[in-house]
């Protein structure tokens, strides 16, 4: 009992009171690099976790979306790396390719500003595996940012002996609640068998959703020689942003399309840098068209990739610019969609839950839930894309005849009662024929493009990969065929 109290006091003593990055123990090089990126004040999770990591603790960090979790682990890793610039110093694992790209960008940006000669490699599916293997072997990167499946593929192919992974000092699981599921179980099991044992490295878990299972890891007694992780949990007063207005539209599921079009053309929102009306007036509906109106920066969330693709094609047919983001797109296309939306070349991103976590998309004015998520946590992640950094935002959820209980369950969990968004139904239905025609055209385009066939090939690849993880890797000839498929 006394040892436990002593450990707790020791951890509390490490918790900082500093309000600057320099006060947290970071080097002047890193502080200067952050200043060049206009980052001068630590967030709560950064102020809590950075000194603990610098002190050598394993850590489980949980804080809301958009709270700066990436720098919470990136900065102490870079700080310690400066003392020993060896290859394979840190491996950062994340569940999606888009998050991997974003993590890679942040490491590169901070490392470039610090001018420490940092080498960071990005390892993810959907790209040329041979080139990735060659980059790892030739470049001997200090930090490897990867999705688990592709990293396992490369290691199982026989590459990786000379990366220096045996000297790895940090292993990070970003969005740990998604990684620590059965989906990634075989890959993580293999990777932790290749990486140095827990006693010889620091293990960091970060997530916006601290599930009971993850919190239990902090209370679990460590194996002999291993460290007990410190739990660093940042609470927020509400589950959703304070300045977020949460609305719903009750409409039969087969009639949603014209209501979506009207919602986009008459968005119920005003945010910094965007107003629907020339004079800055706000209205839920308008009797006359306003020539100064436009679609605000909006993310539309769908449950399925096919739905996202259909809506994207339909809105394009109606003359509303947008891009789609879902798992059935190639990796270059997915990155292009994100870049296009971030650059404000189009006002709308239509995505599955692939776009709900971690992605850095500033100044989103509105989030639309075309399909309500089954899990309230996914709702929180989705609507957290707007009303960030103390700005205003609005979320609008479509509620069908079978979604009432689901909506009520979400309201109960987030302790918010949503407000019904009223629309002039006569005006909505004025464009019914145009919308239904556009939907038929979109359906024919999907049919002609053989949408979904690539997904079937990917399923076969996944089956082969799982067999490879569990047993002997396929021959190089079979592996080449997998990559060509």
Image (cartoon, helix red, strand yellow):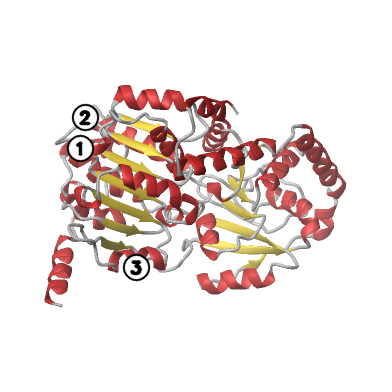
Taking the image as drawn, is residue 42 in sight? Answer: no
Q: Is residue 96 left or right of residue 410?
A: left
Is the Cβ of the residue at disc 1 closer than 8 Å to that at disc 2?
yes
Find the distance from the CA under tag 2 to the CA under tag 3.
38 Å
Q: Earlier in the sequence, mark 2 or mark 3?
A: 2
Judged from the image, the secondary structure of the residue bearing numbered disc 1 is: helix
Q: Answer with left or right where residue 32 lies relative to residue 262.
A: left
In the picture of the structure, the residue carrying the numbered disc 2 is: 116
| Rendering quarter of residue 401 | bottom right
Q: Which mark is residue 181?
A: none
Provide residue 358's location: percent of width, then percent of height. Answer: 45, 48
- x, y percent for residue 242: 46, 63
Quadrant of res 38: top left
Mark 2, Cα crowd under 10 Å, few <14 / some 14-19 / many 20+, is: some
Mark closer to the observer (3, 1): 3
Secondary structure at numbered mark 3: helix
Identify residue for label 1: 81
Q: Residue at x 30, y 24 (%)?
A: 139
In the rendered image, residue 168, in percent from the top left (x then y), is placed at 24, 40
């Amino acid at each position: 009992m006394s040892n436990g109290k002593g450990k707790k006091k020791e951890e509390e003593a490490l918790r900082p009171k500093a309000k600057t990055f320099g006060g947290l123990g970071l080097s002047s090089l890193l502080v200067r690099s952050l200043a060049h990126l206009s980052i001068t004040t630590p967030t709560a999770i950064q102020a809590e976790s950075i000194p603990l990591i610098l002190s050598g603790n394993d850590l489980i960090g949980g804080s809301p979306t958009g709270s700066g979790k990436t720098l919470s682990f990136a900065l102490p890793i870079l700080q310690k790396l400066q003392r020993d610039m060896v290859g394979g110093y840190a491996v950062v694992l994340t569940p999606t390719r888009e998050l991997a790209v974003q993590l890679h960008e942040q490491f590169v940006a901070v490392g470039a500003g610090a001018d420490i000669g940092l080498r960071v490699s990005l390892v993810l599916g959907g790209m040329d595996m041979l080139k990735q293997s060659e980059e790892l072997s030739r470049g001997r990167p200090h930090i490897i940012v990867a999705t688990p499946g592709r990293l396992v593929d490369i290691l199982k192919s026989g590459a990786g002996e000379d990366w220096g992974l045996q000297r790895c000092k940090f292993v990070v699981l970003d969005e740990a609640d998604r990684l620590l599921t059965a989906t990634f179980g075989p890959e993580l099991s293999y990777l932790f068998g290749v990486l140095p044992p827990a006693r010889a490295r620091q293990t960091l878990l970060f997530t916006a959703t601290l599930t009971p299972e993850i919190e239990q890891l902090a209370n679990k007694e460590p194996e002999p020689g291993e460290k007990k992780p410190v739990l660093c949990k940042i609470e927020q007063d509400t589950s959703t942003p304070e300045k977020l207005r949460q609305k719903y539209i009750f409409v039969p599921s087969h009639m949603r399309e014209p209501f979506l079009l009207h919602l986009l053309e008459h968005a119920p929102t005003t945010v910094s840098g965007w107003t629907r009306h020339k004079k800055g007036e706000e209205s839920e509906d308008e009797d006359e068209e306003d020539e100064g109106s436009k679609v605000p920066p909006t993310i539309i969330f769908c449950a399925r990739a096919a739905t996202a693709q259909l809506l994207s094609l339909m809105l394009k047919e109606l003359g509303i610019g947008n891009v789609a983001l879902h798992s059935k797109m190639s990796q270059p296309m997915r990155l292009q969609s994100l870049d296009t939306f971030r650059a404000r070349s189009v006002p709308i991103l239509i995505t599955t839950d692939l776009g709900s976590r971690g992605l850095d998309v500033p100044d989103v004015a509105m989030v639309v839930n075309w399909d309500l998520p089954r899990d309230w946590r996914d709702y929180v992640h989705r609507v957290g894309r707007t009303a960030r950094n103390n700005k205003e935002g609005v979320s609008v959820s479509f509620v069908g005849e079978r979604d009432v209980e689901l909506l009520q369950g979400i309201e109960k969990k987030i302790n918010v009662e949503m407000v019904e968004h009223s629309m002039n139904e006569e005006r909505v239905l004025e464009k019914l024929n145009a919308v239904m025609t556009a939907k038929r055209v979109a359906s024919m385009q999907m049919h002609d493009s053989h949408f979904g066939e690539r997904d079937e090939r990917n399923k076969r690849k996944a089956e082969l990969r799982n067999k490879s993880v569990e047993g002997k890797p396929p021959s190089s000839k079979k592996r080449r065929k997998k990559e060509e498929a």
